[in-house]
Amino acid sequence: MHIQTLILNGSPRRNGDCAALIGEMQKYLEGHVRMCSSYYDGISPCIDCRYCKTHAGCAITDGMQEIYDCLASYDNVILASPVHYSELSGSLLGMLSRLQTYFCQRHFRGETPNLPKKNGVLILSGAQKGTETRARSTANILFREMNVAPVAFVFSGNTDFVPAAADRAALSEAKKAALLLNSLYQQKTAERMELDAETRR
């Protein structure tokens, strides 16, 4: 069994600041990584059709179906976004508005979503420090909908003058975040093996 990580990238720049921080994490992150772009993977925002108030899943058939599958089985979720007007990118918010199906499952259909507990990392890039506060708060709401516990935060906050690829402090935090996810997975695996051994005794 290998660690599985889902990266949800809300940046329109394929080689921009978020990409630099994601790339630094990927150097050290073990296991399988699935990356999804809110800009380039053709995932629709929620259209408020109310289908999920009475039915499982989502009425829209697109790449979000694979993300639902990942959320039901993966170990980690990484959210990455530039800060736009002190908020996550509009594209990422649009894509993750499709988490509405989990809200409706709990609050309207009285069911518990099949979402194992996962560890999460938030990556933000922005031109000014202090603008990340609201974006970070929104990300925590989204993490909660996905049953993700945020364990690390990576922020490059002076990108007008220092690109993230040259931001040593942010790159260091990205590396630490990846190593932390590896360590937490190893710890969970060891605990599971110990529990299985006790069960067999």
Image (cartoon, grey):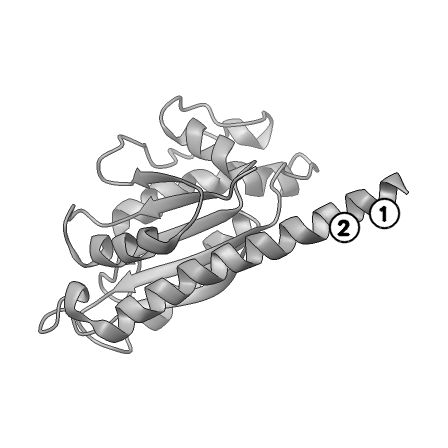
**Closer to the camera in the image, 94 or 83:** 83
Q: Is residue 166 left or right of residue 114?
A: left
Type of amino acid under label 1: Glu
- Label 2's element? helix
Q: Is residue 161 left or right of residue 87?
A: left
How would you rate the neighbour count of disc 1 (Cα within 10 Å): few for under 14, some for 14-19, many for 20 or more? Answer: few
The residue indicated by pointer 2 is: 194
**Which quarter of the figure is the C terminus placed in?**
top right
Whether residues under marks 1 and 2 lie with C-beta atoms below 8 angstroms apart, the answer is yes
- Residue that sits furthest to the right in the current view: 201
Vertical order, 90 against 38 (above or below): below
Q: Is residue 143 left or right of residue 11?
A: right
- Residue that sits furthest to the left in the current view: 161
User: In the rendering, at what x and y percent does residue 96 appear?
Assistant: 40, 43
Residue sitting at 51 percent across and 26 percent down? 51
Residue sitting at 15 percent across and 69 percent down? 166
Q: Is residue 7 visible?
A: yes
Vertical order, 66 against 103 (above or below): above
Residue sitting at 20 percent across and 75 percent down? 128
Vertical order, 39 against 181 (above or below): above
Q: Which mark is residue 189?
A: none
Type of amino acid under label 2: Glu
Q: Is residue 138 visible?
A: no
For the residues labelled 1 and 2, the Cα–Cα distance comes to 6 Å
User: In the rendering, at what x and y percent does residue 86 appear?
Assistant: 27, 67
User: In the rendering, at what x and y percent does residue 88 appear?
Assistant: 30, 57
**Closer to the camera in the image, 182 or 56:** 182
User: In the rendering, at what x and y percent does residue 68 appear?
Assistant: 49, 33
Q: Quadrant of residue 45?
A: top left
- Residue that sits furthest to the bottom in the current view: 130
The residue indicated by pointer 1 is: 198
